Image: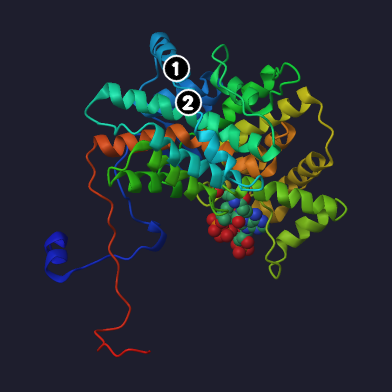
Amino acid sequence: AIDINKLRDLTGFITIDPGYKNSGSCKSEITFLDGELGILRYRGYSIEDLAEKASFLEVSYLLIFGELPTTAELENFENNIKKHSLVNEEMKNIIDGFPKTAHPMGVLSALTSALTAFNPKAVNVDNEKEMYEAICKTMAKFLVIATWTYRKSMGYPLNYYDNTKGYVENFMQLMFQLPTGPYKASPVVIDALDKLFILHADHEQNCSTSTVRMVGSSHAGLFASISSGVSALWGPLHGGANQAVLEMLEEINKDGGDTDKFLAKAKDKNDPFRLMGFGHRVYKNFDPRAKIIKKAAQEVLETLGVEDPILDIARKLETAALEDEYFKSRNLYPNVDFYSGIIYRALGIPTDMFTVMFAIGRLPGWIAQWKEMRENKEPIGRPRQIYTGHALREFKSNK
Ligand code: ACO
């Protein structure tokens, strides 16, 4: 039998797999996903159970540390996040350097990286205390600066974390509290956001998560690695899909609101248009996260009593597509991005902040994967290539 490792050593044998569609980059104990059966589990717990019964911080702890926290462990985690929630005032100078029109994901990536300057202590992975502190700092400060990207774009004063409130409640307050009066978000809204963050918290080796692991594999610190994850998530092929859903709904609205016309366009094979928020590369029967969030979206819309033609179009489109033979026969169901965009819109979150929302949800997954990679002492990521350029050329100046 041929020993494939020896063969590689002898011949320089290299496999090519663009996009790593069939290549595993690591072994992981964090998230299990079966696209055919529509299964998603964090550390062995079903996403349905977690979304129904756990809070976002509980799920974050589970992903990062491997087990559900006890009451004391959760309290300690939350208290440590509060302890680290202040962001160095000098960070405001950096924010002020950006134009108001800067995309919030660009600002978030830069600010996350800048956190390193104010928290320079390298994380020693053999030291559990240091690791724990770094994780709590990241969870706390990332939430605050994520909301600051929005406040900056609106020209509003920046808010501070309120230690009397929970993590998700803080998010809403950091975003929307104005100096002119008190702010209180509805519990239904907090619950829906909590669920949304849980549903986005990890999705195994996707583009941003693999990036975080790759950057971290050079032993770059946690903030720098997370910052690279934000940049990877920013792209429209990854975290930008929920923004695309809203842009499509706005386009239908501008065009007069005729959903049948756009449904027909999506079915027309000569037209490149696709219904955004329908179908999924991995989930071929249904997206388990979409089922959960659909219910939360309904509750939020009912509670807030929002009147919005965009949301009416979304409802009409969803009903029509679910009854349509083209979509039924191809198993094209609304995915998590379809409903998350609707909830964000109803909450008054601007469209270009949607990917930031995704990043806040994905943060514990990135941290968990970074920690696992370091603890497993994974080697530096260094893919090979097949060189297709010139053979040796004699130097002759073109000057
Ligand atoms: N609208 C209309 N037709 C569609 C759609 C859609 N949204 N999605 C797939 N189809 C059709 C295809 O044209 C194809 O039809 P055919 O068999 O007659 O040729 C069939 O369904 C299968 O589609 P594929 O392109 O092979 O499916 P693939 O797995 O490659 O694509 C994808 C999945 C990219 C998500 C696709 O469904 C799509 O473009 N959806 C819209 C964009 C979107 O919502 N993306 C977010 C995904 S969720 C996330 O990334 C977090």
Does residue 182 show up?
yes
Residue 387 pos. (x, y %):
29, 74
Residues at discs 1 and 2 in contact (Cβ within 8 Å): yes
Amino acid identity at mark 1: Lys
* The C terminus - image quarter: bottom left
Tell me the SS state at disc 2.
helix
Residue sitting at 61 percent across and 27 percent down?
193
Quarter of the figure with residue 190: top right
Residue sitting at 29 percent across and 42 percent down?
27
Q: Nearer the viewer, residue 380 or 17?
A: 380
Residue 5 pos. (x, y %):
15, 60
Quarter of the figure with residue 310: top right
Mark number displayed over residue 140: 2
Does residue 37 show up?
no
Residue 345 pos. (x, y %):
72, 37
Queried on whether the Cβ of the residue with tag 1 lies below 8 angstroms from ligand 1, the answer reads: no
* The N terminus - image quarter: bottom left
Q: Residue pushed farthest top? A: 72
Q: Give the CA distance from mark 1 to mark 2.
A: 8 Å
Residue sitting at 36 percent across and 63 percent down?
17
The residue that mark 1 highlights is 83
Residue 261 pos. (x, y %):
82, 58
Q: Nearer the viewer, residue 190 or 292?
A: 190
